Amino acid sequence: MEKIAFLGLGHMGAPMARRLLRAGHPLTVWNRTAAKADPLVAEGALRAGTPAEAVQDAEVVITMLTGPDALDAVAAEAAPALRSGARWVEMSSVGPDAVRELAARLGDGTTVVDAPVMGSTDKAATGELGILAGGDVDSVAGILAHLGTVTRTGGPGSGAALKLAVNTGVIGGVALVAESLRLADALGVDPATSRAALAAGPLGGVVARAFAEGVHFGTGLAVKDLDLAVKAAELPVVTAVLERLRSAAEADPALTGVDIAEAAAHLRSADSSPRTAD
C-alpha cells in the first residue's frame, strides 16, 4: 500500500483522508489548523507539523485546499522535501493555471495529476465522489477508486478546467433558482407551488441543490471559483452572479462560511438585514 501524505483537512479533505486510512494506506496528515487532524490521528494517521514533514516519505501526495493561493503556499514548503518519483494528486478547485504552475514548480521528477471532485461532504464520506482527472491517471487509479468514480478528462489541467466549468454552472444555477423563487414570492405565488414547479422542470437538479441539507460547499469558495471563471473568459451572466454573491457577503459576512443553499435562501429573501454568525 502506497504511503500517502494528505494535506488539507477541511469539510471535504477530512472524510476523504479517512477513507484512505481505512483502506489500509499508511497516512500522514497535515492541516494549517493542527487540531483538525486530531480525529484522524486518533484513528491511526501520523500528524505532520509542516507540509515538508508530511511529504518527505510519501509516495503519493494529495492536496485538498481552499484555492490557488493555499496550494502555492503549501507547494512552496513541500516541494524541496519530495522524494524522487513521487506522485502529486491535486484535488482542490484551483483552475488549470494553478495546476500548470504546480507542475512547473515540481519539475520532471514528480507526476502531477489534477483530480478535482464533484459532490459534497456526504459523497466524500461514502466514497461516491465524481472525480474529474487529467494527466497520468493510471499511476493513481487505485487510490482514487477509494474516493469515487473517475472520469478521465484528457491531459494535465483538463480536470481542473472542467471542474471550474461545472462549478460555475451549479453556482449560477443556484442563484438563478433563488431569484426565480424571489420573483414568484413577489408575485404572490404560493412558495411550495413555485418550488414544486421549478423542481419538475429542467432546473430540477439545481432546485435540489438550492435546498440541500447535510452538505457543505462554502459560499466563500463559490465566490473564489466564480472569480477564477471570469478571469478565464468573458462571462457577463456569471460576473453578475459573482457581484451579487460578493455584495451579499459584504453586507452579511456570516454568509461566507455557510453552504450555498443558505446563500440561496438569502438571495431569495427580500429581507437584506445582516444575519448573526453561528
Image: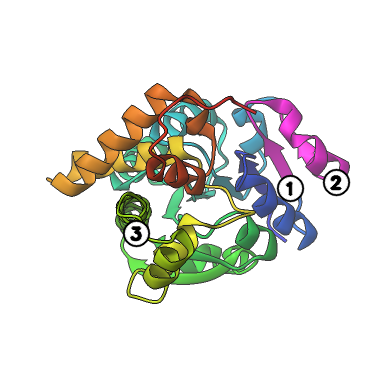
Mark 3 sits on what residue? Answer: 166
Name the amino acid, label 3: Val
Query: Going from the N terminus, do you reach mark 2 or mark 1 first?
Result: 1
Of all residues shown, which one is farthest toward the front? Answer: 188
Name the amino acid, label 2: Gly
Residue 203 appears left or right of 73? left
Q: Which residues are magenta?
A: 28-48
Disc 1, SS: strand
Residue 8 appears left or right of 263? right
For label 1, count other residues whose C-alpha is less than 10 Å away and answer few (under 14), some (14-19) or many (20+). Answer: many
Looking at the image, do the residues carrying marks 3 and 2 touch, with CB atoms under 8 Å apart? no
For label 3, count other residues whose C-alpha is less than 10 Å away and answer few (under 14), some (14-19) or many (20+). Answer: few
Q: Quadrant of the N terminus?
A: bottom right
Q: Position of residue 161 (x, y in %)?
A: 30, 54
Q: Is residue 177 among what the camera can see?
A: yes
Q: Image quarter for residue 174? A: bottom left
Q: Nearer the viewer, residue 6 or 263?
A: 263
Residue 207 appears left or right of 230? right
Disc 2, SS: loop
Mark 1 sits on what residue? Answer: 27
Q: Is residue 102 among what the camera can see?
A: no
Looking at the image, do the residues carrying marks 2 and 1 touch, with CB atoms under 8 Å apart? yes
Q: CA distance from mark 3 to mark 1?
A: 30 Å
For label 2, count other residues whose C-alpha is less than 10 Å away and answer few (under 14), some (14-19) or many (20+). Answer: some
Mark 3 vs mark 2, foreground winner is 3
Residue 112 appears left or right of 232? right
Mark 2 sits on what residue? Answer: 44
Which residue is found at the position 54% from the left and 38% from the top?
Answer: 258
Q: Position of residue 180 (x, y in %)?
A: 31, 56
Q: Image quarter for residue 103? A: top left
Which residue is found at the position 60% from the left and 38% from the top?
Answer: 8
